[in-house]
Amino acid sequence: MEHYFIAVTIFCAIITRISCCDVVKLTFPSGFRVGTASASYQVEGAWNVSDKGENVWDWFTHNKPEIIADGSTGDVACDSYHKYEEDVQWVKNLGLDFYRFSVSWSRVLPNGFANEVSEDGLQYYKNLTQALIDNGIEPVVTIYHWDHPQILEDLGGWTNELMVEWYADYARVIFEELGPMVKTFITINEPKIYCEQGYNSTTKKAPGKTLENMGHYLCVHNSLKAHATAYHMYDDEFRATQQGQIGILTPCTGWVPGDNVTEESIEQHFQFDCGWIMHPIYVGDYPEIVKTRVANISALENYPFSRLPEFSQEWIEYINGTTDFFGLNHYTSSMPIFDTAEELGIYTRDSGIIKSTNSSWSTGSSSWLYVLPEGFGNLLRMIRDQYNNPPLYVFENGYSDTGELEDYERISYYYGYVSEMLAAINDDGCNVVAYTIWSLLDNFEWNAGYTELFGIISVDFNSSDRTRSAKLSTSWWQEVISTRTLQDVPSNSTRR
Ligand SMILES: *[C@@H]1O[C@H](CO)[C@@H](O)[C@H](O)[C@H]1NC(C)=O
Ligand SMILES: *[C@@H]1O[C@H](CO)[C@@H](O)[C@H](O)[C@H]1NC(C)=O
Ligand SMILES: *[C@@H]1O[C@H](CO)[C@@H](O)[C@H](O)[C@H]1NC(C)=O
Ligand SMILES: *[C@@H]1O[C@H](CO)[C@@H](O)[C@H](O)[C@H]1NC(C)=O
Ligand SMILES: *[C@@H]1O[C@H](CO)[C@@H](O)[C@H](O)[C@H]1NC(C)=O
Ligand SMILES: *[C@@H]1O[C@H](CO)[C@@H](O)[C@H](O)[C@H]1NC(C)=O
Ligand SMILES: *[C@@H]1O[C@H](CO)[C@@H](O)[C@H](O)[C@H]1NC(C)=O
Ligand SMILES: *[C@@H]1O[C@H](CO)[C@@H](O)[C@H](O)[C@H]1NC(C)=O
């Protein structure tokens, strides 16, 4: 009898231990928030309703259709301008805590400047915000997600330092009008991407300019100044009454081990990828390695200055500390290695890093999207160590396919990435406080048009109604959110 009890007790202890730890590993911590996201140009459509002005993406898709994979536009996209109430119901049915959307600058300020404000434009965002609040969903507002007014671009866009003031004027309108209802603001989405792919390339993103291998540096420089100006404005004029938080967001890629991947190559990759944007905000000024490498290579190219502009001491201090959270978008990883051509005195990349990959890795329909969950954990631990473990919001993470309703690969991606994140939180003490599914709907994927779809909900782009329907990942996420626990990836044996 005694033996029986002891045996049973030990057996139960083992079982409890196993189930306890499995559960701990796959369960969101209490208070953890899960949401989903979108961006104005990718979903709204209604590009010419009321008094809305033309933005750079309207101009780009209308004038450079050859750059968009399928020649499409965001003129109608998901028609979320007219269907926002239905979108909100989907978010509610998923059980999500927040919805991150962006405001279209030219919808609110039709001619770009704050001398003329569109009442209709503002009303749309007030309606959407109110609908979210009425349904118990927190609105998270991205003030700028790549679609600035075309007139500002004609005046130089992000390479013109006056953009800092024009952005600040626009941000003030948003704080005044939406601030009373919104507790979380993101100033700017991914400066690294629109700066590199819009101002140092003619073939990817609007405005599609190449500017002497320095447009991207000027663009990030002015974007950081614009961000900091809006942060201080919020701090000085709005925070006391609105009691919200505000920060910036950057995409960082991770890394996985491989031949010639070293601590040094990982560090150099991190500073050019993530540190370029976040070092000025968390530590002060650009990372030393970025400053010296670009200065040295510029000198080799006979420039009398560095292609990387310098911040004055005043700007260094003004930008330092201007975020309430680390906003992270993350999708993929690589094996970062040093470019060995440099040993021969050939400098082809300012970063000096080649992001090498392995042809055996699986990808989404986006060729760059290698599925490497362990790289996410490595990145989260690096951010913890580099910036003193700041509160971190994952504001985008997701997988592209071509719109399958039975999206097993998407579920498998989410399972891998979210379990890595939970391990980084539970085992390594990473201060991740929120996670965001990119994206709610299949939508206009910039220069990929509708050929790379990230939604957990399908949209029929051939129907004038833009009919939404559930995918397999819709119900999977519903279950994950209601149990606050990761669910197994469904078996795809029935797949056609
Ligand atoms: C808006 O653009 C659509 C094409 O997307 C066009 O058919 C329509 O006439 C335009 N409306 C106005 C008011 O310009
Ligand atoms: C905002 O909501 C009101 C009331 O439902 C509606 O009449 C109006 O058309 C909406 N405006 C926009 C731009 O969505
Ligand atoms: C910018 O463009 C130049 C020349 O077109 C290219 O060599 C360089 O790699 C690009 N840099 C980035 C960061 O995209
Ligand atoms: C690693 O470096 C060695 C020595 O430079 C080189 O021979 C080898 O090709 C490199 N491997 C990879 C995967 O780059
Ligand atoms: C940036 O702010 C941090 C925290 O206040 C401070 O320790 C650091 O010295 C500042 N950096 C610069 C370059 O001023
Ligand atoms: C930049 O050049 C200086 C002087 O030649 C050299 O000492 C330094 O190591 C270089 N730094 C980098 C990061 O290349
Ligand atoms: C690519 O991955 C395969 C399978 O994991 C491995 O055998 C191979 O060594 C890898 N190649 C490189 C260059 O890392
Ligand atoms: C939408 O229409 C295009 C061409 O008109 C066609 O190739 C595609 O299969 C259609 N998609 C759906 C989901 O019906």
Image (cartoon, grey):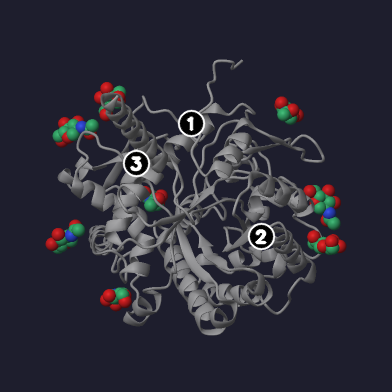
One can see residue 367 in this view: no
Quarter in which the C terminus is drawn: top right
Q: How many other residues sit within 10 Å of disc 2, few (<14), some (14-19) or many (≥20)?
A: many
Q: Is residue 231 visible?
A: yes
Residue tagged by mark 2?
55
Horizontal side, residue 172 vs residue 50: left or right: left
- For image coordinates 55% across by 82% down, the residue present is 240
Image check: 7 left or right of 152? left
Q: Can you tell which of label 3 and label 2 is closer to the viewer?
A: 3
- Residue 385, percent from left and from top: 27, 57
Residue 419 image-quadrant placement:
top left
Q: Position of residue 304 (x, y in %)?
A: 28, 68
Q: Residue 34, image x and y in percent?
A: 54, 51
Q: CB atoms at circles 3 and 1 under 8 Å apart?
A: no
The amino acid on which the numbered mark 1 sits, given as a three-letter code, is Ser
For marks 3 and 2, give the CA distance. Answer: 36 Å
The reply, left or right, for residue 377 in relation to residue 68 is: left
Helix or strand or loop: what does disc 3 sit on?
A: helix
In front: 95, or 223?
A: 95
- Mark 3 belongs to which amino acid? Gly
Label 2 SS: loop
Q: Earlier in the sequence, mark 3 or mark 2?
A: 2
Name the residue tied to disc 3. Answer: 375
- The tag on residue 154 is none
Relative to 95, residue 234 above or below: below
Crowd class of label 1 (few under 14; some 14 to 19; many from 20; radius 10 Å): some
Q: Earlier in the sequence, mark 1 or mark 2?
A: 2
In which quarter of the view is residue 55 placed? bottom right
Q: CA distance from mark 1 to mark 2?
A: 37 Å
- Location of mark 1 (residue): 412
Residue pictured at 68% horizontal, 54% vertical: 58
